[in-house]
Amino acid sequence: MIDTMLQWLEHSSPAVAISQSIWLYPILEIVHITGIALLVGPAIMFDLRLLGFSKDLPVSSLARHLLPWSRRGLLLIVPSGLLLFITNAVALWHDPVFLVKILLLVVAGLNAFVFHYFTFQSVTVFDATILPPTAKITAGISIIVWLAIIACGRLLAY
């Protein structure tokens, strides 16, 4: 059942157009990598602040400056990633590295959700006091998970 749907995706007009074009696939890869840089770079810089680096920078200011860039990166990653996936859906779906990458993306999303909706409820508290241990835990998880996601993405190319 799922293989039938994946084969349908691979034979869809967008997948065929991307696969047959000399430019579309590389352009999508560039967009995807640019999105990764925009999402992960600012996220890791913010996570490092939560771990205690650059203590002279207020967490709230850093959040206002860096996290919108991460959201913009996500806007590039999701559509480009889906378009890259449909060109090779069957093989990717059966690749354990791809499945680990998807699982890690879910973990990253849940970790961000926990941080933003439970840990980071009051930014002024973050600027005025020592950061709670949960902030440091979510920051550490974030760094490890995003680096593992990037590693999985690179391993998929081989």
Image (cartoon, rainbow, N blue to C red):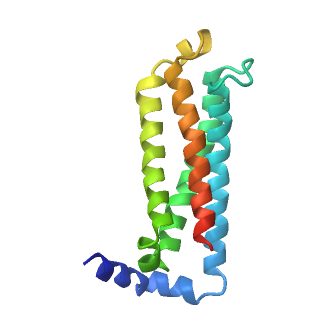
User: Does 110 appear above or below 78?
Assistant: above
View extreme (front): residue: 96
Point 49% across, 87% down: residue: 16
Is residue 40 left or right of 53 when viewed as pictured? left
Q: Quadrant of residue 66?
A: top right
User: Does 155 appear above or below 38?
Assistant: below
View extreme (top): residue: 128
Q: Quadrant of residue 60?
A: top right
Residue 65 makes an appearance in the image? no
Residue 127, horizontal then vertical, whole percent: 61, 14
Residue 149, horizontal then vertical, whole percent: 56, 54
User: Does 56 appear above or below 17?
Assistant: above
Residue 107 makes an appearance in the image? yes
Point 58% across, 48% down: residue: 146
Counting every numbered tag in the picture gives 0
Point 48% across, 51% down: residue: 104
Residue 140, horizontal then vertical, whole percent: 58, 34
Of the 4 image quadrants, the one containing the C terminus is bottom right
View extreme (left): residue: 1
Point 61% across, 66% down: residue: 155
User: Does 15 appear above or below 151?
Assistant: below
- Name the one closer to the observer, 156 or 63: 156
Is residue 94 left or right of 46 when viewed as pictured? left
Is residue 128 left or right of 13 when viewed as pictured? right
Of the 4 image quadrants, the one containing the N terminus is bottom left
Is residue 154 left or right of 57 when viewed as pictured? left
Residue 79, horizontal then vertical, whole percent: 50, 64
- Name the one closer to the observer, 78 or 141: 141
